[in-house]
Image (cartoon, rainbow, N blue to C red):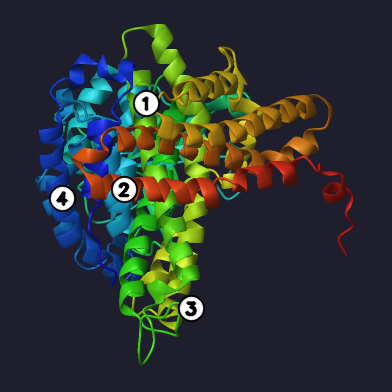
Amino acid sequence: MPSYTAPLDDMLFLFEKLRDNKNYNELEKYNEVNLDLVKDILEEAAKINQNLLLPLALAGDENPAKLENGVVRTPPGYKEAYQKYIEDGWISLSCDPKYGGQGMPKTVSAFFDEMLSSTSLSFKLYSELTIGAYNCLLHHASDETKDKYLPKMVEGKWSGTMCLTEPVCGTDLGMLKTKAVEQTDGTFKIFGQKIFITSGDHDLTENIIHLVIARASDSPPGTKGISLFLVPKFIVNEDGSIGARNGISTGSVEHKMGIKGSATCVLNFDEATGYLIGTKNKGLNQMFTMMNLERILVGIQGLGISEIAYQNSLTYAKERKQGKTNNTKSTNGADFIIEHADIRKSLLNMKSIIEGERALCFWLSQQTEVSLNHPDEQVKQEASDYVSLMTPVVKSLFTDLAMEITSDAMQIHGGYGFTKDQGIEQLYRDNRITPIYEGTNSVQAADLVFRKLSNKNGNIIKKFLEMVKSECDSKNEKVRSYSKELNYYLDILHKFTGWIEDKTKIEKDDVSAAANDYLKTLGYVSIGYSWIKILEVSFSDYETNKEFYEDKINTAKFYFDKVLPRAEFHYKSAISGSSNIMNFKFN
C-alpha cells in the first residue's frame, strides 16, 4: 500500500502568501478564516486522510462495490469510515451554515479535496457527488425544497447523484430519452434508464437524492427541452421523515479498470416520482452548476493522485539501488537510483508540475469565491469569466498530466511498479477515468476553443493574457528573467489565439484538430504564471525560510527549463492544420 503525508507546508504557504486577490480579500464572510484556523483544519484533515481513509484504497480495489439481491454493498470498512467522516463534519466543510455547514471557502476545501483524492478516490466520490448535488439545489431549488433536503445532505445522512448519461447519449445530451410526465398534483413520473451513475446506489446513507435530467411530455426536442428533476430513492414525507421506496432500481454495478470501491450504477426509473427544480426546459443550465464544479474537482483528483504517486516514487528512489552513475558514490555495489540523472529528471518533472498545479488551483479557488460572493456585479462577472475559461484547462491538463506522472511512477518502481505489491499500478488505474468522466478531455478542449475564449462579455482570453502580463511585470530583478521567459510563451499563446480565431471563420476542422494543443498551451502558460507568483514570494521572503524557498526557486527553474517549452511544441504542431488528418484514407 502506498504511504502518504499531506503536503501541509505547501498548502499553508499558498494560503498565507498567495491569498493576494484583492477582490477575494474584500469578501467579508471570510474575514475570520485566518491562517491559524486553516492550519488547525488542515492538520485534522491530514490525520483522517492518513490514518482512516488511506487503507480504504486497497480495500476498495480488492473488494469492489457489488450488487447483491437488489442491494449495493460498499467495500469493507467503508460504512465505519463514512460514519466517522460525517460525525466529524467533513462533508459540511464548505456548505452554508444556514443548512448546518461550516462555511469554509474553496481556498480551504480544495486542499481537503486534494487530500481525499490522494488517499482514496473511490471513497471520496460518495461525498463529492453529494456536494455537487447540494450546490445545484442551493442555486436553483425553491426555499421549501432547500429546507427539506439540504440539511440532511449537509449532515451526510443523505447523499446525492448527478444522472445525465443514457445508453444513447453521453456528450450529446440533446438525444436523451428519459421522459417526465406531469401529474395532477404537480409532481412528475419519471421513465427511463441512466448509466455510469457515480454513487448511484450504496449502503452508506439513509436516502439518495438523484438529480435527473429528463424531457417533459410537452417539451421541445434537443437540449432546449431538458428539465431537471429531484428524484429521491425514498420519498420524503412532509415532516421530513423517510417514506416509501420510489420507483428506482439498480440494474447493475459496472466492473471497472479502477475506482472499484465506487459504485458506478445503471439506474432504472419506472414511474419514479420526481419534483421539478426551477423552470421547465432550463435543466441543462441548472445541471451545469453541478457539472462545472465537478470538472474542477476532477482536475483536483488528478492533482491528488499525482501527489501520492510522486511521494512514493521519491521514497523508493532513495531506497532502491541499481547500477552506477557517472559520478558514483559507491565503492562497491550500486548507487541509489535517485542519483541517476533520468530518475532525478522524472522526479523533478512531477514535483514542478504538481506544485504549479496546486498554486493555479488556489488562484482559481479565489476567483470562484469572488464569482459567487462579491457584491460588485462587474467584479463577479469578470471572475466568473476567468473560472469559465480555466475550468476545462484544470479538468483536462491536470488529469492528462496525472496519467503521465502515474506512468512515470510505475517506471521508477520498475518491475515492482507493475505488480500490486507497491500499490502504484492502482494509482494509474484509478486515475484513468479522470480524463474520461465529466466530459472527456477532447470535449473540454472543444468547449474551450469554440465557447470559452470569448462570450457576450467580451474577449475573455485577451483579458486573461493582459492580466497575466501585467502581474508578471515584476520589480524584483531575480524574478524578471523568469517573467521575460514567460512573456515569450505569452506571445506564442497570443499568436495561437489569433490563429484559432481566424481558422474558426474559415476551417473549423483545423480548430478541432488543434483544440487539445491549444488547451495544453494555455495550461502550461497558466502554470508558469502560478510559478511567477511563487517566485515573487520566494525571492522577497528568502531569508525567513531559506531551505523552503530555495527548494521553490530550483523547482521553478526546472519547470521553466524543461516543462514550459512544451507549450511551443503544441503550438507548432497545431498550426500545421488538419488537411492530412481529414484527407487520410484509413484501410
| Residue highlighted by disc 4 | 85
Cα distance in 3D space between marks 4 and 1: 26 Å
Residue 82 quadrant? bottom left
In-front residue for pair 555/290:
555
In this orientation, which residue lies closer to the viewer: 79 or 453? 453
Measure the C-alpha gap from mark 3 to mark 1: 49 Å
Which amino acid lies under the numbered mark 2 shown in the image of this protein? Glu
Which circle's residue, 3 or 1, is located before the other in the chain? 3
User: Mark 2 — residue?
Assistant: 550
In the displayed structure, would residue 331 be above or below residue 202? below
Q: Nearer the N terminus, badge 4 or badge 1?
A: 4
**Relative to 367, residue 272 above or below:** below
Disc on res. 34: none
Residue 283 appears left or right of 122: right
Where does label 1 land, which residue? Answer: 368
Q: Secondary structure at mark 2?
A: helix
Is 472 or 65 nearer to us in this picture?
Answer: 472
Mark 2 and mark 4 in contact? Answer it, CB < 8 Å: no
The picture places residue 429, in percent across and down from the top left corner, at 45, 65
Which secondary structure, mark 4? helix
Task: Look at mark 3 in the image and give the residue it sits on.
Answer: 326
Image depth: mark 4 or mark 3 in front: 3
Mark 1 in CB contact with mark 2 (< 8 angstroms): no
Task: Tell me which corner region of the image, top left, top right, bottom left or bottom right, holds residue 571.
Answer: top right
The answer to which of marks 4 and 3 sits earlier in the sequence is 4
Looking at the image, which residue is at 52% across and 38% down?
393
